[in-house]
Amino acid sequence: MLPSAKKSRARFLPYVLVGIGLFLYFRTFIFPLTPIYQGDNAPVFLLEARRILEGEVIYRDFFEFIFPGTQVLYAFLFKLFGVHLWIPAAMLVALGLVLTWLMFAISARLIPAESALLPGFLFVTFAFGNALDATHHWYSTLGVTGALALLMDGRSFGRLAGAGALCGLATCFTQSRGALALLGFGVFLIWECYAGRRSWRWLAKGEGCLVSSFLAVVAPFVGYFAIKVGFGRFFYCTFTFIRKYYSFFDRNNLGVYMVDVPAYEGILEWPAVAIWLFIHAVVPLAFVLFFVKYWREATAHREEPWDRLMLVGVTGLASFLAIAPAPNWFKVCTASLPALILFVWFVRSEEPIHRAVRMVLWAVGLGAFSLMPVMVQTDWHRRIEGPAGSAAVDSAHEEGPRGLPRRHRRPQDCEDVLGRGVVREPRALQRLREPAAARANLRPQRVGG
């Protein structure tokens, strides 16, 4: 990137981030300060965080199959600010801003200045803005994306240790995504060594930095809960149960791919269908096309930053493999960051067809950026009040539970939880701050061991 172009982008970046922050605010709050009930799974994690604050122990007193990073984070925020419904909405705004900023930083090292902002803009309008559920998927995506950004400018031992620690942090939220990202970075280091850029001795040290820092984060965090509930119970809930029963639920298998098509009764819904098709086309096709392009053109076009591009491609492939067993729309969105960067890199040149593609993407993105907040603010909402504050509920969440597995059971009941309803309807949010005695129907029997 030319120095003048880099300075121009840096000068406008704060204004771009302010605009994106406003976009996310009006997607997550009804003006001025009423949070919107968002997502399918976030209320489950909020209730579990509240139970942790009451002294219950995850995996022992209630069932969960995800590593407890999300529950611990929300329990900490509840302890710090009190139990309020605005916390997950505010976290969505923060997540979207930081992820978009990281995408800007990564794209600036691969794409010409005039298009460097496009991947992040597409991400926040096409993907993140349509997948607002403050769960472990986005927090683990943040850790992996931070590790990717850290390694873009070099692979010193300090940077590798930092990337390993961030993968460890991602693992504390989603065990598969963080571990596969670490594996991807390890494979990238082997590729870099094989390509002659590093020595085998350096490779051994680099892999050691990655793995040791990863374990330094994961082992104490996971070890604490394993000791509290017993290693056998912890391993059963977070590994054995997933292997044996996860795919039995009708939303946790390959059959969910491209089934949740947006409604397209009228012309106003067509852009939403186009965005849906675009994201599904880019993920994982962009990764496949990149590896083919590298195999065919790397030798002839040595001027390209192949090391950085390979790092993005390997990270993207690892992210996709993490969600591949159940690639629903929400999970595909969480894996779309590297794919969008690679896609814009494909169309970065000044050829007429590439310029036309970029113009169309900017036009659709700006349309979504302008219309989505207006539609949210003017749509019909029901306001609910409770001890944790007020929230706005739209018509999409008025139907109650729609088949998510109930997690508020005894661990030994986990074999038959799949296919049952979950406490995720708006009244669950109304009860978020009620004491345990008032939520007796949500409290499981305490299990020994």
Image: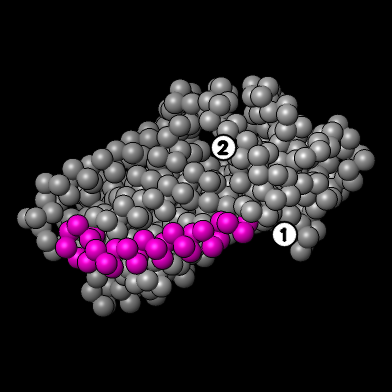
Q: In the rendered image, which residue does mark 1 sit on? A: 77
Q: Eyeballing the image, is 327 above or below 303?
A: above
Label 1 element class: helix
- Where's the N terminus, which quadrant? bottom left
> Mark 1 or mark 2: which comes first in sequence?
1
Q: Is residue 338 left or right of residue 133?
A: left
Label 2 element class: helix
| Residue depicted at x 55% and y 61% | 217
Q: Eyeballing the image, is 300 above or below 66?
A: below
Residue 194 in which image quadrant: bottom left
- Extent of the magenta region: 192-221
Q: Main secondary structure of the magenta part?
A: helix
| Residue depicted at x 66% and y 24% | 415
> Where's residue 101, x and y in %?
45, 63
Q: Is residue 112 left or right of residue 258?
A: left
| Residue depicted at x 30% and y 73% | 6
Q: Judge whether residue 352 can be spotted in this image.
A: no
Circle 2 residues within 10 Å: few <14, some 14–19, many ≥20: some
Circle 1 residues within 10 Å: few <14, some 14–19, many ≥20: some
> Where's residue 341, x and y in %?
33, 53
Residue 325 in which image quadrant: top left
> Where's residue 119, x and y in %?
36, 54
Q: Eyeballing the image, is 142 above or below 202?
A: above
Rendered image: mark on residue 353: none
Q: CA distance from mark 1 to mark 2?
A: 28 Å
Rendered image: mark on residue 239: 2
Q: Eyeballing the image, is 419 above or below 68?
A: above
Q: Is residue 329 left or right of residue 448?
A: left
Q: Is residue 438 left or right of residue 186?
A: right
Q: Amino acid under label 1? A: Leu
Q: Amino acid under label 2? A: Phe
